[in-house]
Image (cartoon, rainbow, N blue to C red):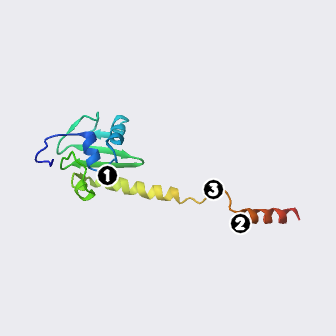
Amino acid sequence: MSSDEVGRVRLDKWLWAARFFKTRALAATAIESGKIEVNGERVKRAKQLQVGDELRIRLGPYHHIVAVRKLSEHRGPARIAAELYAESEEGKKAREAMQIQVKAAQSVPGYDRGRPTKKDRRDIERVRRRGLD
């Protein structure tokens, strides 16, 4: 069904169709845990969305602020899903700033490779032997 045929759509179906979540169950869980707001209010998953509603969606550290442009109950290609909403400039800027922070935090150097390899172990033993001499 397109937006011409549909006057209102359940929030969890729309979030799934707009590809914010892989399944409706994940969308429902996010709604119930308060990560989705419609027009500034916390809502239930059966909330009927209509064109023009503003959604605040928290996905991990990222916040999406989108306006509903079209309604759909069916999940389609990403190209069509992107037409269902319009993201605000404020939301885009905040998300891009958060991306920079996340990248900076991930680039902190450290030993995160797990167990030492056989070569690493031999190097460690060589250093230890030198320290005892």
At 46% from the left and 56% from the top, the residue drawn is: 101
Q: Quadrant of the C terminus?
A: bottom right
**Is residue 38 at least partly visible in the picture?**
no
Return the residue at label 2. Answer: 119
At 26% from the left and 52% from the top, the residue drawn is: 88
Q: How far separated are the C-alphas under marks 3 and 2?
A: 14 Å
Q: Nearer the viewer, mark 2 or mark 1?
A: 2
Crowding at label 1, few (<14), some or many (≥20) Cα neighbours within 10 Å? Answer: some
Q: Quadrant of residue 113?
A: bottom right
Crowding at label 2, few (<14), some or many (≥20) Cα neighbours within 10 Å? Answer: few
Return the residue at label 1. Answer: 91
Q: Nearer the viewer, residue 55 or 90?
A: 55
| Residue type at numbered disc 3 | Gly
Where is residue 114 shown, x and y percent of the image? 63, 56
| Residue type at numbered disc 2 | Lys
In terms of secondary structure, where does tag 1 sit?
Answer: helix
| Residue type at numbered disc 1 | Gly
Q: Nearer the viewer, residue 63 or 73?
A: 73
Precedes in sequence: disc 1 or disc 3: 1
Where is residue 17 shown, x and y percent of the image? 26, 48
Q: Is residue 37 left or right of residue 49?
A: right
Return the residue at label 3. Answer: 114
At 35% from the left and 48% from the top, the residue drawn is: 63
* Vertical comparison of 133 with 90: above or below: below
